[in-house]
Amino acid sequence: MFDFLPSVRLQSQAEYYKDLTRGTAYVNSVGDEVYASGSQYQNTYSIRADMTLWDFGVRAKRMEMAELDVLASLEGERKALLELKLAVLDEYTAACMAATEVRMRREMLPMLEEVHEILQRTFKAGLTDKVSVIEAQVEVDRARGEILEQEHELESRLANLSFFTGEQYLVDDVGVADLPEPGEMPDSFNAEAHPDVRRLDREIAKKEAEASMSRRSMLPVVSMYSRYSYYGTDPNSFDRAREDVTERGYNVGVVAILPITEGTRGVVSVRRAVFEVSKLRAEHAKLVAELDNSFRKIEAAYSNVFCELIVALSNKSKMLEEIGALSRMWGLRMEDRERFVMSKVSLVKELINVEMQKISKSAIIQNAY
């Protein structure tokens, strides 16, 4: 935008002019140069304004390139936001799995402790052996260790989430909600809307504008200038010339500049820009093909993952029913209760695996969106 406005500058100049014609030349002013008659000290103070009148669109192309730079940066921000969302989803999935495992293993721990207590009683009654009691104690200790391990994992994942959200989460004070239920898979995928593809579109347009600007820069540039000056001279003293700045002048002119030696450099710039456009177009086509291929793979796997999720939810419902049925059998004899409690423990372990599968499948589906 500022390229289309006049440029204004203040200028002060002091010089000594040596006349080689021994005072026979006339005083002439051509552009910025003043040719005096006779050797003298010269001082001038001036204000000058320059404005390009016609440059065959070089300034417009320069503005277009700047705008494309901004748009490419915005696409970079969109890509960074997308990657941030995926990173948060990964951390939340891991936190959800850890929190679920901690909760269910805490529910399972009293069952293992009860089994250990039952075996201790039956051992005292001579109905079981010492090895079974020791194995039950090992299971209790292992369960406690797994709870601590998963609590540490949950604490680590919550700390990572705190980095993204700026909020502090404590293991005992936070509840991790399930991932949302997945919906239908999108019918189509537009690879051209992906931030990386859109960024390449901006880069291609920028290089095309650069090539066009390089071609136009080899054409003449017509500009207008205006200067208002105070000046003073003295043949013998620089100080008197500086103090005697009383004469004034004003001039207006038009100048046309045609680059000659810079033309070769412009040709090289055009060729380089055209080559980079071809390179970016190939990269663009490759990226679009890779994104389309990735979408087709996700689309093919989506239905399978969705079916597996439905099966996992069905298994979870059945296991909860079985656990509920076992919970109503607490009136059994001591030697039978241990068997039913261990059956319930086995079901809880299987339920933990089912929950992990459900969370994992839900995360895969959420990533597909």
Image: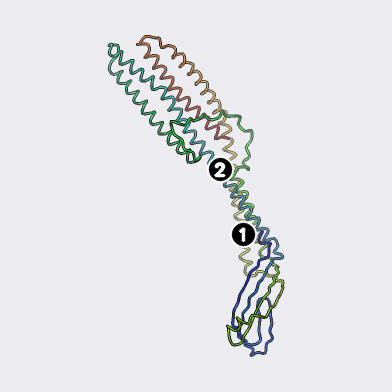
Q: Please name the amino acid that badge 2 sits on.
A: Leu
First in sequence: mark 1 vs mark 2? 2
Provide residue 359's location: percent of width, then percent of height: 50, 29
Q: How is the image coloured?
A: rainbow
Marks 1/2 in contact by CB < 8 Å: the verdict is no
Label 2: state its secondary structure. Answer: helix
210 sits left or right of 153 in the view: right
Label 1: state its secondary structure. Answer: helix
What residue is pinned by disc 1?
A: 271
Q: Residue at x 40, y 9 (%)?
A: 331
Image quadrant assignment for residue 156: top left
- Please say if 161 is above or below 355: below
Query: How far separated are the C-alphas under marks 1 and 2?
Result: 36 Å
Crowd rating for badge 2 (residues with CA inside 10 Å; few <14, some 14–19, many 20+): few
Q: Please name the amino acid that badge 1 sits on.
A: Arg
For the question of whether residue 103 can be seen, the reply is yes
Q: Residue at x 48, y 26 (%)?
A: 355
Provide residue 92's location: percent of width, then percent of height: 49, 34
Q: Quadrant of the N terminus?
A: bottom right
For the question of whether residue 286 can be seen, the reply is no
What residue is pinned by disc 2?
A: 81
Number of marks drawn: 2
Point out the frontmost of discs 1 and 2. Answer: 2
Q: Quadrant of the C terminus?
A: top right
Q: Residue at x 56, y 41 (%)?
A: 82
Provide residue 69's location: percent of width, then percent of height: 61, 53
